[in-house]
Image (spheres, helix red, strand yellow):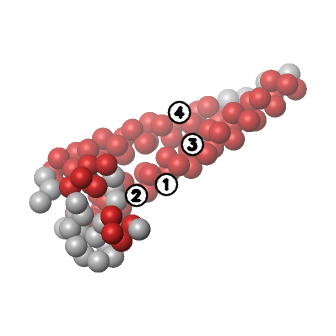
Amino acid sequence: MTDIAARKAKLVQKLNEMNARLLKVEDALDDPMPKDWEDAAIEREDDQVLEEVGHAAQREKAMIVVALERIVAGEYGFCAQCGEDIAEERLDVLPYTPVCAKCAK
């Protein structure tokens, strides 16, 4: 089975990265709009991209938090749907996944 302590450490590291990314996005979105109309239009487009990046980071952060909760509950590494082990290879790629590859399909 999985080395839970190592997986937990990676998840905590990833959570910290997500928090840092979200702070950068929030800071960038808080910047004042330029007075020039063309620059402001470009800034609005950039803000839309940043908002999408922020939403994606929030979704990933939520999945990491749930994975950490599953570790505490002793449920990490087991599929939340069928109860079977989640393959180590899958956890290497998606350490916060709650389901095995079969159930993900």
Q: Tell me where residue 20 appears, x and y as whole percent.
A: 44, 36
| Marked residue nearer the N-terminal end (2 or 3) | 3
Most distant residue in the bottom direction: 82
From the viewer's perspective, is the residue at label 2 or at label 4 nearer? 2
Tag shown at residue 53 = 3
Q: CA distance from mark 4 to mark 1?
A: 16 Å
| Marked residue nearer the N-terminal end (4 or 1) | 4
Above or below — where is 72 with respect to 89? below
Circle 3 residues within 10 Å: few <14, some 14–19, many ≥20: some
Above or below — where is 39 with respect to 98? above
Tag shown at residue 63 = 2
Say what amino acid the circle numbered 4 marks.
Lys
Say what amino acid the circle numbered 3 marks.
Val
Q: Residue at x 34, y 43 (%)?
A: 14
Say what amino acid the circle numbered 2 marks.
Met
Q: Tell me where residue 48 appears, x and y as whole percent.
A: 69, 41
Image quarter for residue 33?
A: top right
Residue 102 shows in this picture: yes
Which residue is under mark 1? Answer: 59
Image quarter for residue 10?
A: top left
Q: Quadrant of the C terminus?
A: bottom left
Which residue is under mark 4? Answer: 24
